[in-house]
Amino acid sequence: MSEANECLFCKIIAGEIPSNTVYEDDSTIAFSDIHPKAKVHVLIVPKKHYANVAELAEQDSHELSHMVGIAKSIADKEFHGAYRLIFNTGEDAGQSVFHVHAHVLTGEVMAE
């Protein structure tokens, strides 16, 4: 079985696992994090499987830029455009699902 077939986010993209989808287009999906770290905590995930943000930047910089645009749109809607955008890359940096995803944290004033 391939890595993508076992991937949690690939299963969400395929509709095998339910999610609270807040945005979707042909290349990208965004859904609420099940363990939010802020009032609004959304994961933005490309539908094509990339292991991490470095791999995505190398192979599809347009998709990476598109994800940043989606983050801005979510923050514009949820909290006057202010947001934190986080990519964890590697297990030692806190990445637990090895399908690149951006964490959008917004909806409230955040400390450093």
Image: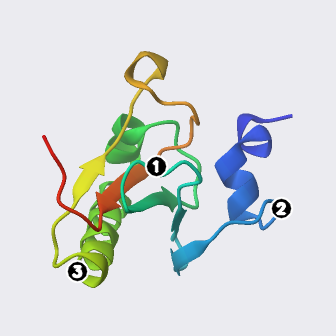
| Residue position marked by numbered label 3 in the rendering | 76
Question: Residue at the location (68% across, 63% down)?
Answer: 13
Place of residue 38 in the rendered image (x, y in percent of width and height, measured from the top left) = 36, 54
The image shows residue 23, relative to residue 31, as above or below, that is below
Label whose residue precedes the other's in the sequence (1 or 3): 3
Place of residue 37 in the rendered image (x, y in percent of width and height, measured from the top left) = 40, 48
Q: Is residue 17 left or right of residue 71?
A: right
Q: Is residue 68 left or right of residue 2?
A: left
Q: CA distance from mark 1 to mark 3?
A: 20 Å
Q: CA distance from mark 3 to mark 2?
A: 30 Å
Specify whether residue 60 is in view: no
Q: Is residue 18 left or right of residue 27?
A: right
| Residue position marked by numbered label 1 in the rendering | 101
Q: CA distance from mark 2 to mark 1?
A: 18 Å
Question: Residue at the location (79% across, 44% down)?
Answer: 5
Question: Residue at the location (44% across, 61% down)?
Answer: 42
